[in-house]
Image (cartoon, grey):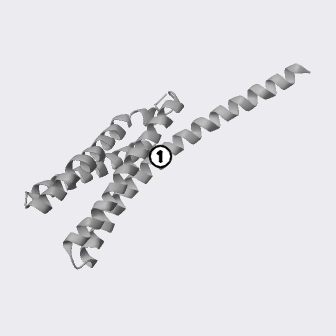
Amino acid sequence: MGRPATRLCLFVTYKAALLCCAVLSRLHILLAALWWGGTTALAFVAVPVLFMHFDSPALAGAAAAKLFAAQSVLTLVLAAVATLVLILASGQDQAGKSTRVFWVGGALLAICNQWWVAPLIVSARSTGGNLALWHGLGSSLIVSQWLLALATLWLLTTPHKLEPN
């Protein structure tokens, strides 16, 4: 009687492992989509709308800074979860492994933008410093994050080619 139960247990364990790997692979795509979609919505929709509808550029800039801060934290959380997913997938998600450098790069850009460039923008605004320089650098970092997120999503959703016989 123990043998059929053992076989059933092994079968259920095998199916659960396959399901877990499939879920982890799909979760990695979802994380990349959230990263790219959030950055797209913020940088190319929300912030331009703020500057169109607020009377004061300073007020729009302050609101945009808060949104960019939230996006930076979101990027860090998504990168951390994606790293955990890659560890849990342990070799099953080859496309995911190749995106590691994109996740790390995006996290580093978010850190630089939030805790290095953003304070310099605030300082330049209040002291009459080179606001255009720091704003341009911050914008470049956001666009770079967007490109890394796009590359990650693109790589994860590209169908794997079948090798010829």
Query: In percent of the image, x 49 and y 30: which residue is there?
Result: 87
Residue 101 is situated, as x and y percent measured from the top left of the image, at: 33, 35
Q: In which quarter of the view is residue 99 placed?
A: top left
Residue 58 visible somewhere in the drawing: yes
Query: In percent of the image, x 47 and y 46: which residue is there?
Result: 29
Q: In which quarter of the image is the N terminus?
A: top right
Image position of 29 (left or right of 110): right
Of residue 81 and residue 146, the one placed in the foreground of this image is 81
> Image height check: is 28 above or below 74?
above
Of residue 93 and residue 32, the one placed in the foreground of this image is 32
Query: In percent of the image, x 24 and y 71: which residue is there?
Result: 59
Image position of 6 (left or right of 144): right
Residue 94 is situated, as x and y percent measured from the top left of the image, at: 45, 32
Outermost residue, right direction?
1
Residue 162 visible somewhere in the drawing: no
Q: Residues within 10 Å of mark 1 (few under 14, many from 20)?
A: many
> Image height check: is 76 above or below 90?
below
Q: Could you tell me which secondary element the residue under label 1 belongs to?
A: helix
Residue 25 is situated, as x and y percent measured from the top left of the image, at: 52, 40
Question: Which residue matches tag 1?
Answer: 29
> What type is the residue that disc 1 sits on?
Ile
> Image height check: is 61 above or below 153?
below
Outermost residue, front direction?
127
